Amino acid sequence: MTVNGAAAAAWMYPGRPNEDNACLNTVWQAYGSPHTIGRLPHHTFGTAIEAYNYTTKRHTDRNPPEGAAVWFGACSGPRYAGDEHWRDGDVTVARKGILGATDYKTFGHIGECTIAEREAQTGRKYAGWTEDIFGHDIILGATAAPHATPLATTEEDTMKLNAIRNHDGSIGLIDEGGLLYPISDEGLWNCYLRLGIVQQQPDGTFFLQQTDGTVWNALSTRTARVLAARSSADPKAIAASLAPLLIPTITTALGEAGSLTAAQVEAATQAAIKAVFADAAK
């Protein structure tokens, strides 16, 4: 049994939507959704690493021919708190000297990158390219079947927001005005990634990593001041809504210095925010 490499490369065109964090399923579709052979009883692979380990025709040079499956290994460890995919590996398809890769440069869309760029983005080392996948030989140098030409795309005028990860694991978005918006819901964070509004950093990650709470504290204070100056609502209500900005940092700063309850920390935080309101009104 064989699959068409040229057709897979053509299928992985830039801008095509993909399910985020689903490189193996996307590449499986690119090769025509073949039935995996020789993998009884379930005929499936859970991760790219599993699929790579099942290949037999491997090469380690960095010049994969068009249509070849191109693989990357596991990360050295979790890349962020709660990273469940660091061991999974990654797979892409070679496209005339470049790779067709999922979630590049934004989650939810296929993009083109070099091997080095994919290593930098994912934190995974290059494993090599193969002439087979899912138990099938890949026909390299074949002609792709005619397919619909993708619609021309233009660079969207989308506002990009920087994301910050505090030293305690808290995540927030920073707008162009320097205001901080904490994100406590993982589903909301994934939604922002899929929409492509989170700015990718030069190191390929989506976070400005912080070793202490200095920057987070400064942004929190600025945000509280600006919102206080803009708002005509009840200061007590605003204090209650802004307290989550500061509570994690205050709790961490307290450490073992005291034995305050969570309610006491919240009350102290709201009092601090009210003081910011008064200062902003001067």
Image (cartoon, rainbow, N blue to C red):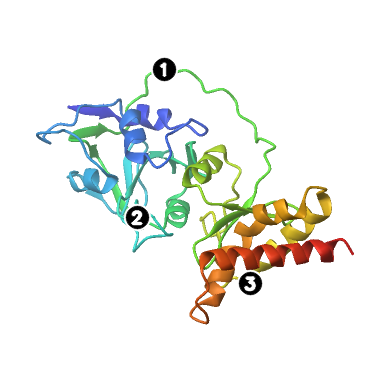
Where does the image place residue 65, in percent across and percent down from the top left?
Answer: 35, 41
User: Hey, what amino acid is under mark 2?
Assistant: Trp
Q: Please name whichever residue, 18 or 175, is drawn nearer the observer in this view of the structure.
A: 175
Q: Earlier in the sequence, mark 2 or mark 3?
A: 2
Does residue 175 appear to the left or right of 124 in the view shown? right
In the rendered image, which residue does mark 3 sit on? 214
User: Hey, what amino acid is under mark 1?
Assistant: Pro
Residue 203 visible in the current orientation: yes
In the rendered image, which residue does mark 1 sit on? 146
What residue is shown at x 49% (from left), y 39% (from top)? 111
Q: Which callout, 2 or 3, points to the residue nearer the camera?
A: 3
Proximity of marks 2 and 1: CB atoms separated by less than 8 Å: no
Q: Please, what secondary structure does the residue beneath circle 1 have?
A: loop
Q: Is residue 229 above or below residue 261?
A: above
What residue is shown at x 42% (from left), y 51% (from top)? 115
Measure the C-alpha gap from mark 3 to mark 1: 56 Å
Q: Is residue 258 above or below residue 202?
A: below
Q: Quadrant of the C terminus?
A: bottom right
Residue 211 visible in the current orientation: no
Q: Residues within 10 Å of mark 1 (few under 14, many from 20)?
A: few
Q: Please, what secondary structure does the residue beneath circle 2 have?
A: loop
User: Hey, what amino acid is under mark 3?
Assistant: Thr
Q: Residues within 10 Å of mark 2 (few under 14, many from 20)?
A: some
Where does the image place residue 49, in percent across and percent down from the top left?
Answer: 26, 49
Q: Quadrant of the N terminus?
A: top left
Measure the C-alpha gap from mark 2 to mark 3: 29 Å
Q: Earlier in the sequence, mark 2 or mark 1?
A: 2
In the rendered image, which residue does mark 2 sit on? 86
